[in-house]
Amino acid sequence: MMAKMNYSSQGYFILLGFSSWPHLEVVLFVVILIFYLMTLIGNLFIIILSYLDSHLHTPMYFFLSNLSFLDLCYTTSSIPQLLVNLWGPEKTISYTGCMIQLYFVLALGATECVLLVVMSYDRYAAVCRPLHYTAIMHPRFCHALAVASWVCGFTNSALHSLFTFWVPLCGHRQVDHFFCEVPALLQISCVDTHANQLTLMITSSIFVLIPLLLIFTSYGAIAQVVLRMQSTTGFQKVFRTCGAHLLVVSLFFIPVMCIYLQPPSENSQDQGKFIALFYTVVTPSLNPLIYTLRNKDVRGAVKRLMGRE
């Protein structure tokens, strides 16, 4: 077993990606590059604006900046490699590069699951406990929640990545995906991987279903408060901020659930590539638009930054 592991570690993986549809590769390259540039520009805009404008030094924009930085790292962990593979005939990644990519994709994905829960708790505190909001969401507590999100994600990934790469690959190195993902890597193993698949199912349940339950609980409490509101202005403000977060939650969790929580079926691998493409490319590029469009705080911050106020 060790000999096989050493052989693999000295070689490389072939990322098959979208090679089954060679006529689509040029189109995919252009589309993915556009979305990647949108992701970089949009998320950097939120981070810089939140840092420069003192009016945005609030828990909501602190967590939003964390989400933007997270999305930048998440897309960069896989998309540049995909663009290189789509552009030329070489579709390889080194064993070490594959390990690093898998680790960061898992870590950042799990971190986003936890961070979205934290953001829903912030909205719960703002709407349901407005008089105590400043005391509840103290800056030190906000920083602790953000650090806890990152630590949970990276700890989970360290354990899961180690468990995945301990599986012998027997010299077969053709990964039927556009990045190093656990299900695709388990498919090229020559030993029984039921233990790995069970571990994947358990960790996916912990980092997907439990966060969703907590988010729905928070928004259930918010819905009760909103239904009792007499002010139309207050209702619209709550709907804008909470509606944006719920849309982001849906765009991230639904594709992830389709990948990790559904039983395998025919053509599921090909479908999985396009679903993974959605939550690694499209969702991070849409998040800045969702949070900034029709957002008075952001528009005001831009005007102040340009010296118009």
Image (cartoon, rainbow, N blue to C red):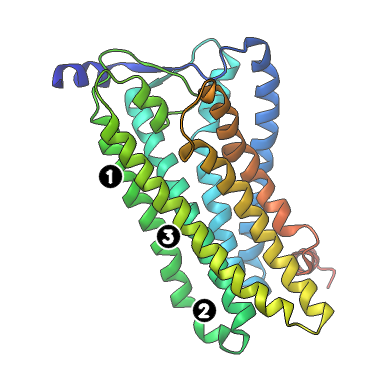
Q: Where residue 79 appears, x then y in whole percent?
A: 55, 32
Q: Is residue 243 visible?
A: yes
State the residue at coordinates (54%, 10%). Answer: 89
- Residue at image mark 1: 159
Secondary element under disc 3, as helix, strand or loop, is helix
State the residue at coordinates (60%, 17%). Answer: 87
What is the quadrant of the N terminus in the image?
top left
Closer to us: 190 or 292: 190
Numbered circle sitting on residue 51: none
Label 2 sits on what residue type? Answer: Met
- Residue at image mark 3: 149
The span from disc 3 to disc 1 (Cα, nearest Å) is 16 Å
Tell me the crowding category of disc 3: few under 14, some 14 to 19, or many 20 or more residues within 10 angstroms, Cα based: many
Q: Where residue 234 appears, x then y in whole percent?
A: 77, 79
Residue 170: image quadrant is top left
- Residue at image mark 2: 137
Secondary element under disc 2, as helix, strand or loop, is loop
